[in-house]
């Protein structure tokens, strides 16, 4: 079991420096050249989905009063997606499989939006605690339920992302260890299964980054 979970071990170091966490910044270094070099196919391919995300996030947020807010969530999506995909490469550490990384992203977003909402829009935040059409008898219970749901939002965001990354990597690791011990007749089937799972994990890596960014946008839009 120690060898199985060693892919999530962040303790590998070189000269007392945690080198595993440096893989978090590899993807961001690959993106920097598209912001100062001339437009090319690589930059065009990257900016098309970013523009689509920008338009989608503007629907959830008010673009007149929150100019530039969508760039925060697009950056979060980019960071999470790149870390998820980079973790599928051999010998690269998946930082998003740890709550240290995911909770660091979710908690400041939630805390800042809650502070802004309760300071600037106090009446609106109180109205969110009681949904429209709630009977008078159920109002105290709805306040408790809505308060608990607001408090667990950063936890659900971070745990969802980390759990999905851990589950997919564990399945790939188990199949990889099993493939080494099967007969040659079953080898093509195992390789095909691993290729399909790797394709699925690539899709999950993109979807989980999108879900994290969209839910963060929705939580922020409630404050406004």
Image (spheres, grey):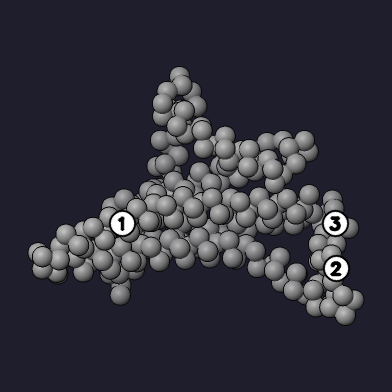
Residue in view at x 61 percent, y 38 percent: 54
How far separated are the C-alphas under marks 1 and 2? 47 Å
How far separated are the C-alphas under marks 3 and 1? 47 Å
Q: Is residue 163 above or below residue 78?
A: below
Residue placed most toward the observer, 55 or 74: 55
Q: Residue 178 in the image: x percent, y percent?
A: 21, 69
| Quadrant into which the N terminus falls | bottom left
- State whether residue 174 appears in this view: yes
**Disc 3 or disc 1, which is closer to the eye?**
1
Residue 13 placement: quadrant: bottom left
Residue in view at x 23 percent, y 58 percent: 192
Identify the mark nearer the N-term, 3 or 1.
3
**Which element carries disc 1, helix, strand or loop?**
helix
Neighbor class of circle 2 (other Cα within 10 Å; few <14, some 14-19, many 20+) is: few
Report which residue position mark 1 lands on: 196
Identify the mark nearer the N-term, 3 or 2.
3
How far separated are the C-alphas under marks 3 and 2? 16 Å
Report which residue position mark 3 lands on: 124
Q: Residue 80 in the image: x percent, y percent?
A: 49, 50
Residue lying at the far left of the rendered structure: 184
**Which element carries disc 2, helix, strand or loop?**
loop
Identify the mark nearer the N-term, 1 or 2.
2
Q: Is residue 37 above or below residue 131?
A: above
Q: Residue 98 in the image: x percent, y percent?
A: 46, 62
Residue in view at x 27 percent, y 59 percent: 194
Q: Residue 51 in the image: x percent, y percent?
A: 57, 34
Q: Is residue 34 left or right of residue 66?
A: left
Report which residue position mark 2 lands on: 133
Q: Are marks 1 and 2 in contact (CB under 8 Å)?
A: no
**Disc 3 or disc 2, which is closer to the eye?**
2
Residue lying at the far top of the rendered structure: 38
Q: Is residue 180 above or below residue 59?
A: below
């Amino acid at each position: 079991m120690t060898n199985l979970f060693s892919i999530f071990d962040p303790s590998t170091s070189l000269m007392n420096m945690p080198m595993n966490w440096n893989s978090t910044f590899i993807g961001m270094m690959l993106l920097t050249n598209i912001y100062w070099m001339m437009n090319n196919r690589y930059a065009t391919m990257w900016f098309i989905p970013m523009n689509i995300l920008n338009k989608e996030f503007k629907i959830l947020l008010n673009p007149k009063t929150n100019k530039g807010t969508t760039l925060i969530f697009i950056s979060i999506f980019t960071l999470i997606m790149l870390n998820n995909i980079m973790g599928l490469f051999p010998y690269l550490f998946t930082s998003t499989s740890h709550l240290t990384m995911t909770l660091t992203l979710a908690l400041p977003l939630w805390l800042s939006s809650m502070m802004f909402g309760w300071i600037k829009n106090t009446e609106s935040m109180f109205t969110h605690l009681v949904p429209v059409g709630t009977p008078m008898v159920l109002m105290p219970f709805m306040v408790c339920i809505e308060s608990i749901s607001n408090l667990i939002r950063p936890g659900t965001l971070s745990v969802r992302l980390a759990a999905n990354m851990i589950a997919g990597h564990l399945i790939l690791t188990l199949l990889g260890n099993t493939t080494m011990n099967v007969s040659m007749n079953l080898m093509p089937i195992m390789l095909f299964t691993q290729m399909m799972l790797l394709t699925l994990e690539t899709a999950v890596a993109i979807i989980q980054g999108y879900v994290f960014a969209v839910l963060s946008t929705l939580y922020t839009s409630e404050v406004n």
